[in-house]
Image (tube, rainbow, N blue to C red):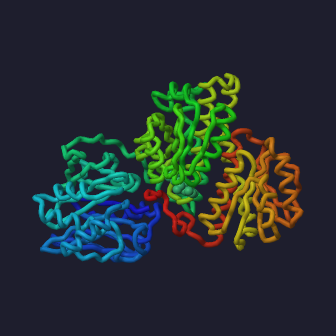
Amino acid sequence: MCGIIAGIKKENVVHDLINCLKKLEYRGYDSAGIACFENHRIERYRSVGKVSELEKIVGSKYSNIGIAHTRWATHGMVNESNAHPHLSTRDGFSVCVIHNGIIENYKELKVLLIKQGYRFESQTDSEVLAHLLHAERKKSSSIIHALQTVREKIVGAYALVAICDKDPNTILGTKKASSLVLGVDEENKQVFLSSDPNSLSGILNQIVFLEESDIVCLEGTEFSIYNNAFNKVDRKITMLDVNNDSVSRGKYQSFMQKEIHEQPNAVAMTLENFLDENSLTAGLFGDIAKRVFGQVEQIIIIACGTSYHAGLVAKYWIEELAKIPVSVEIASEFRYRKSVIKNKTLMIGISQSGETADTLAALNLARNLGLEWIFGICNVQESTLMRICNLSFITRAGPEIGVASTKAFTTQLASLFILALTLAKTKSHISVQDERNFLTQLRHLPNAIASILHEEQNIKNWVKYFQNKQNVLFLGRGIHYPIAMEGALKLKEISYIHAEAYAAGELKHGPLALIDENMPIIAIAPNDDLVHKLKNNLEEVKARGGKLFIIADHGFELQEDTCTKIISLGDHAGFLSPILHVIPLQLLAFHVADSKGHDVDKPRNLAKSVTVE
Ligand code: F6R
């Protein structure tokens, strides 16, 4: 979603700001803007569409201080007036503000500001911040005191940066429930603020994660941080763990394709710490994990989208291996439901970004209801999610840039399987021999994924059957039903083909009515205990003229014919089968979308990280 970048350096910073905006493009946006100083005055440039459009407008402008933004419309249409930065000019000076998040009391503030004579040019909630900061700057001795007062008056979620031409060497920032980091480079005398640390890769490598309500003041190339009580504080500097390679497409035509192919390595990295040993230890999940895992009686998993599907798979693993009841809930539903949570419940939040607003709100709700044990599975160590959890597991997939989640999903699954095994071990439900066997299978998993990626051409051969379809049905049973759901989500979000997933046993209860020669059906058919049941369901589909596309294992009993295509993945992989069966579905979605000429990395209307509800 929206991205913020701001910086001061000794030389021209405009070019850096544009480059950083390009690195933020993957988050999804519809307009972009930049403000900088020219001859001690604030100049602002905005454009609808790609950052490259803004780049053309900015041309070769020179400024050593600037703030820039990519906007993803929430309040107000996609147009130039609604694009950030927002400017407030009167009484001989200007204030310019960029904001991510939502100001909940913006309507009340707007009424007050209009009464004071401020004129609004946009439909956004964010514009109130520019006028409010201007009004407070007029009354205050410094911009930092003005921002302190603004912070007290606003309600909602925000990461904001601001400049004022009364304070020409200064950029201010503050944040609450939205990400903002400080980037520091003492050697080259430059300081930056960004909503996404990855955007700073290649510019500097020291990062400070701001705490809630911190105000940060960049002055010249120095910085100072003030906490909620307005005391000057030191915050820990950490090294930025991203290299430029991970945010470039390399030899691939899109990030999504690259990320699909990175899965063997991403899974290997994620499992590294666990597979060095011959036995699992709860301690790897955090200091209190052993005690918590021993006592836990119920698990609730909270997530959105693809991460939710990972949770659904984990339910099968944890219940079967560790015998602990698990419920899996969509975060946006859970947060507004009056749920009953028993003592000794472990709440697990799964999120690639760790910034998904609904997931964070649901976990905070659980904490406010008195739940002590909050476990986060996340791909970003420095995320908000990681900071609100007291147990955690970091998936080491590396930055995921494509909007459609792929390597984050398979690494979440690998982590959740390790968790299921560790819970089972702590509860004495698996033998030493079983544990060793599972660890051996996990060690083999990256290679197993790699060999499925070799099926890419076979999958590509199926594209012609889907390209011009309006609807596709995905079928699965048992633990592969969530994999069917994930396959349907992947296809719909990047190819814009309507895709639905059904538990195959439900066919007779309604969806069989949809089957005809125009409805391709993708079936996930591993050689597990349910394969015969599934085969019966697929015979019913064939009998009604349905065209079947089956992702099977060796030994699947149906034969290929004009209406039945089969790709076989090899021997059945037991518990790990969902991690393998999802890969052909990712590849199919990618190639269908690509064949339709879509921008697979930035599908329409979607953002990578959903930081507002
Ligand atoms: C789909 C997709 C989304 C995300 C969802 C949650 O491909 O990427 O459905 O899975 O927005 O995001 P995270 O995992 O960052 O909380």
Kindly identify the residue that appears in the image at 57 percent across and 29 percent down: 276
Kindly identify the residue that appears in the image at 39 percent across and 66 percent down: 70
Residue at the limit of the structure toward the left, as seen here: 141
Kindly identify the residue that appears in the image at 47 percent across and 31 percent down: 286
**Image check: 559 left or right of 419?**
right
Is residue 586 visible to us here?
yes
Q: Is 487 or 65 nearer to us in this picture?
A: 487
Is residue 16 visible to us here?
no
Q: Position of residue 155 (x, y in %)?
A: 31, 57
**Image check: 427 left or right of 465?**
left
Q: Position of residue 458 (x, y in %)?
A: 75, 59
User: Which of the 4 image quarters holds residue 170?
Assistant: bottom left
Q: Quadrant of the N terminus?
A: bottom left
- Considering only vertical position in the picture, is 291 above or below 106? above
**Image check: 12 left or right of 548?**
left
Q: Is 119 or 19 nearer to us in this picture?
A: 119
Q: Position of residue 287 (x, y in %)?
A: 45, 28
Please state the quadrant of the image where ligand 1 appears. Answer: bottom right
**Image check: 290 left or right of 326?**
left
